[in-house]
């Protein structure tokens, strides 16, 4: 998430940005419009009445029903779990709060399609809508728990105390004061989860729930690039962009402003008394089903699988492909994110506004639809890119640029343009000035951005499935293809490697960001 | 300190750009460097394509890159790619994808010697593709859930309320679509529509045949419509199976024989080597590699399977040939009409 407020902005001294800044931004804006263009082209080719006919039928209504039920079910469950957990760990005297905080974020270490495979391998009864809501909630609730817990910790307790002196009981205080204060972080987390549910593919295809995303992939498997897939993509795009619009609307409102710093202190802790046992059991149950079962099942299949053949060469190859693609993707993201960040921070004008909104737009685009659009346009207009890793890296850049944007922008805000100008008066060219003055300042942020993109790209599944060059397998695609044939033991080593190389670092990074303050 | 940071930053920037450039340029270049590398679009099972490619490379020294996808997807992909298709040979689990490619002129004619090694009814009339192996549609059932004599005489009878929740099928599977076309040919479009509507209402759908078979094996569903070789694949993995196979008789559509098939892409840049691969698939050695990987019936004249299958001549399939099945488009339309897809 980006932080919105940037108070002291430097007055722009140059009105016109150089072409090297404009080019990447224009390129990205163009690329991010490709999915819309793809849907439009395909609808045009099919004819609008045929397009409507493809959409207005019971099959699509069923997809809509599944998608909405999943979205609402998972978001509500996550909100309840995240909120209660945040309160329990921040405001009560529950024993072992710190430890629980660390343990209950472990789902961050397990990609959703890995945890769903472990559940399905436990019993087929976890297939379908109920199972999907359970598995997805368990892997996504930290997205609400962490930001809400952080907000709770930093709340000025004076407000709540005043309400109590004015005669409110604890529940009254919670609903009238605390909840409204938590509302922005709760809502932001919920919208993020809702968006994730719209675009999730791997986990849902393993659980066997048909949503728009899995149906689009099915259409791709039936007919490669066809009007059916494009029309379903259109619905998915509309849903994603509506959520984006909702998020932008909500983000602007409901900000609570505190005047004056006040004394920094923590809120009084509620003594759980006889409720401490249920509290402990609640945390324990969450830990067991949230990470105990997935990690335990994975260990089981790993042990079972290692007794059979252990294809070291194939595993090594997949690891190498994953690493090199993720490194390339992260590098490309940095190369694009720096100019976008510079444009946002140092210039004004319509393009800068576009650049500012770009990460939000990109974040709302489903990876599967991006991949479909890229396949189509590469094949018809840029055949040199078709089935190359370059095309896959472009997809990664589109998917993961938002992750790189946040740290880089914050850092660029601190790098005063006057420093670069001083360097230029001393005879440096603008590129040298940037490299020798600004780059060292934003260097740590570049490192952070690189790590974030790299770790997420390691786990990428959908775009990789559609775009990877012939014969190339990654850890994620291996997990998926073995799981879709129910070869759980064969999938286990890839899944374990994925968690080790990408999941654990993500977990450490994320929890450190929120918990150890 | 500042200087060191600057140097480090410049170095990092340089190495990043080099890495990006290298990665983007290297992958396609690596393929172009080798003089003869074939690309096989493989819609057949992954291990089948991989083992075939490895055996062919061991014999001829020609490397084969395998792109795995579903047969339908790869066929449409080859059409969309047209002249630009990177594929040299296409190997599908079914005949309809190759049939439609052949009819629309995307395939080159197979060498005569390759065509002559195989029975006439299992190669394309225009010689653009060959049937590689044969398989039969069956019902896999779990005797703990249902006894064999309770199974119906005809596959059409599964579209009945008494099978509510007991019969599983895979609507996206190409072989299922072929079976639907066979029913259209044998009993007419209305009967096929009724059958699909009934299955949709009373049956359980699965994402692929292996998932369906394992559901029977675990007793989640009493019976499923699959191809014979899945059962042998699972048996090889597990040793002993609870589930059993039931073969329909008297020419019922439930016992349809379908063929996996292959053809050389017209746009291939290595037509000679591509024909060599196709010939290898029809050769005794190639057929052995394939049928030992998957328990299908070898197509080459005079060969029999070594996997303990019910002998091919004992099967009583309906009289529906790959030519009758055509491109199976009617099945896809019908499945969309009844809301299965």
Image (tube, coloured by chain):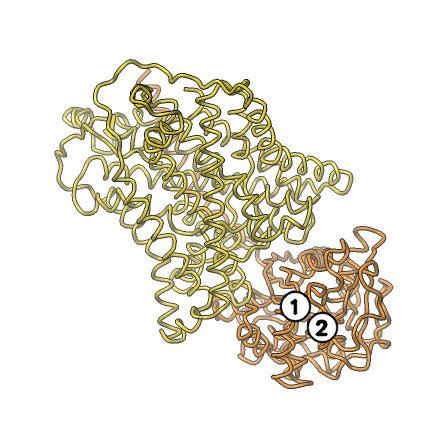
Chain colours: A yellow, B orange
Q: Chain of mark 1?
A: B
**Where's residue B43, x and y in %?**
62, 63
- Residue named by callout 1: B202
**Where's residue B258, x and y in %?**
71, 74
SS at mark 2 in the image? helix
- Determine contact: label 1, label 2, CB under 8 Å: yes
Asked if B150 appears above or below B19 in the picture, the reply is below
Give the class, few, some or many, for how many residues have Cα within 10 Å of label 1's Cα (few <14, many ≥20): many
**Where's residue A302, x and y in %?**
70, 37
Earlier-in-chain disc, 1 versus 2: 2
Asked whether residue B60 is in view, the answer is no
Asked if A92 appears above or below A430 in the picture, the reply is above
Residue at point 68%, 46% (across, down): A121
Q: Quadrant of the C terminus of chain B?
A: bottom right
Between A515 and B110, the one nearer to me in the picture: A515
Residue at point 53%, 18% (across, down): A273
Between B304 and A85, the one nearer to me in the picture: A85
Left or right of residue A404, residue A258 in this image = left
- Residue named by callout 2: B158
Left or right of residue B153, residue B211 in this image = left
């Amino acid at each position: 998430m980006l932080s919105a407020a940037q108070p002291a902005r430097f007055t722009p001294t140059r009105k016109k940005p150089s072409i090297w800044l404009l080019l990447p931004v224009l390129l990205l804006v163009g690329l991010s419009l490709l999915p819309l263009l793809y849907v439009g082209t395909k609808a045009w080719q099919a004819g609008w009445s045929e397009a409507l006919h493809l959409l207005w039928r019971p099959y699509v209504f069923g997809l809509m029903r599944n998608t909405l039920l999943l979205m609402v079910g998972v978001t509500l469950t996550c909100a309840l779990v995240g909120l209660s957990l945040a309160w329990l760990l921040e405001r009560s005297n529950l024993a072992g709060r710190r430890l629980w905080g660390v343990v209950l974020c472990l789902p961050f270490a397990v990609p959703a399609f890995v945890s769903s495979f472990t559940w399905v391998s436990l019993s087929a009864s976890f297939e379908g809508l109920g199972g999907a809501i359970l598995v997805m909630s368990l892997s996504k609730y930290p997205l609400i728990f962490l930001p809400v817990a952080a907000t709770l910790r930093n709340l000025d307790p004076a407000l709540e105390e005043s309400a109590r002196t004015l005669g409110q009981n604890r529940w009254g205080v919670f609903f009238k004061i605390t909840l409204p204060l938590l509302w922005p972080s709760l809502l932001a987390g919920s919208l993020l989860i809702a968006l994730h549910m719209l675009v999730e593919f791997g986990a849902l295809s393993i659980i066997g729930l048909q949503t728009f995303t899995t149906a689009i992939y099915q259409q791709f498997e039936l007919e490669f690039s066809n009007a059916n897939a494009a029309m379903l993509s259109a619905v998915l795009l509309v849903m994603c962009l509506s959520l984006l619009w909702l998020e932008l609307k909500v983000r602007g409102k409901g900000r609570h402003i505190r005047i004056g710093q006040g004394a920094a202190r923590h809120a009084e802790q509620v003594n759980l008394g006889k409720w401490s046992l249920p509290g402990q059991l609640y945390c324990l149950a969450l830990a067991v089903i949230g990470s105990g079962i997935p990690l335990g099942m994975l260990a089981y299949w790993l042990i079972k699988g290692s007794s059979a053949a252990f294809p070291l060469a194939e595993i090594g190859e997949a690891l190498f492909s994953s690493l090199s693609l993720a490194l390339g993707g992260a590098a490309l993201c940095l190369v694009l994110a720096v100019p976008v960040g510079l444009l946002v921070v140092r210039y004004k004008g319509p393009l800068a506004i576009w650049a500012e909104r770009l990460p939000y737009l990109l974040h709302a685009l489903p990876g599967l639809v991006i991949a479909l659009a890229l396949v189509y346009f590469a094949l018809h207009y840029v055949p040199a890119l078709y089935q190359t890793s370059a095309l896959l890296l472009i997809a990664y850049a589109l998917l993961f640029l938002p992750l790189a944007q946040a740290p880089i922008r914050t850092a660029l805000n601190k790098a005063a343009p006057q420093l670069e100008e001083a360097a230029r008066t001393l005879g440096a060219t603008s590129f040298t000035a940037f490299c020798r003055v600004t780059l060292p300042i934003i260097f740590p942020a570049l490192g952070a951005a690189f790590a974030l993109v790299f770790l997420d790209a390691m786990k990428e599944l959908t775009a990789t499935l559609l775009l990877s060059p012939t014969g190339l397998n990654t850890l994620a695609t291996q997990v998926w293809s073995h799981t879709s044939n129910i070869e759980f033991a064969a999938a286990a080593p890839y899944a374990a490697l994925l968690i080790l190389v990408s999941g654990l670092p993500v977990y450490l990074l994320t929890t450190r960001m929120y918990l150890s303050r | 300190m500042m200087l060191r940071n600057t140097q480090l930053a410049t170095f990092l920037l340089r190495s990043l750009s080099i890495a990006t450039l290298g990665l983007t340029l290297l992958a396609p270049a690596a393929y172009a460097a080798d003089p003869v590398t074939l690309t096989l679009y493989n819609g057949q099972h992954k291990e089948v394509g991989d083992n075939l490619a490895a055996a062919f490379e061991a014999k001829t020294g020609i490397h084969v890159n395998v792109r795995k996808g579903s047969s339908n997807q790869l066929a449409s992909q080859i059409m969309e790619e047209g002249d630009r298709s990177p594929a040299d040979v296409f190997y599908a689990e079914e005949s309809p994808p190759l049939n439609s490619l052949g009819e629309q002129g995307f395939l080159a004619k197979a060498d005569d010697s390759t065509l002559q090694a195989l029975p006439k009814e299992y190669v394309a009339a225009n010689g653009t593709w060959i049937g590689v192996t044969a398989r039969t549609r069956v019902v896999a059932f779990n005797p703990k859930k249902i006894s064999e004599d309770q199974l119906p005489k005809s596959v059409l009878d599964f579209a009945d309320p008494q099978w509510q929740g007991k019969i599983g099928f895979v609507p996206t599977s190409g072989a299922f679509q072929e079976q639907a076309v066979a029913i259209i040919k044998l009993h007419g479009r209305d009967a096929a529509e009724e059958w699909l509507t009934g299955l949709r209402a009373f049956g359980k759908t699965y994402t692929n045949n292996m998932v369906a078979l394992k559901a029977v094996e675990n007793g989640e569903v009493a019976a499923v419509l699959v191809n014979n070789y899945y059962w042998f694949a699972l048996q090889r993995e597990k040793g002993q199976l609870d589930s059993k196979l039931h073969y329909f008789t008297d020419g019922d559509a439930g016992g349809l024989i379908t063929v996996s098939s292959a053809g050389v892409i017209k746009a291939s840049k290595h037509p000679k080597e591509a024909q060599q691969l196709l010939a290898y698939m029809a050769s005794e050695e190639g057929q052995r590699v394939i049928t030992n990987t998957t328990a299908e019936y070898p197509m080459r004249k005079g060969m029999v399977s070594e996997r303990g299958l019910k002998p091919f001549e004992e099967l009583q399939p309906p009289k529906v040939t790959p030519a009758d099945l055509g491109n199976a488009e009617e099945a896809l339309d019908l499945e969309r009409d009844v809301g299965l897809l």
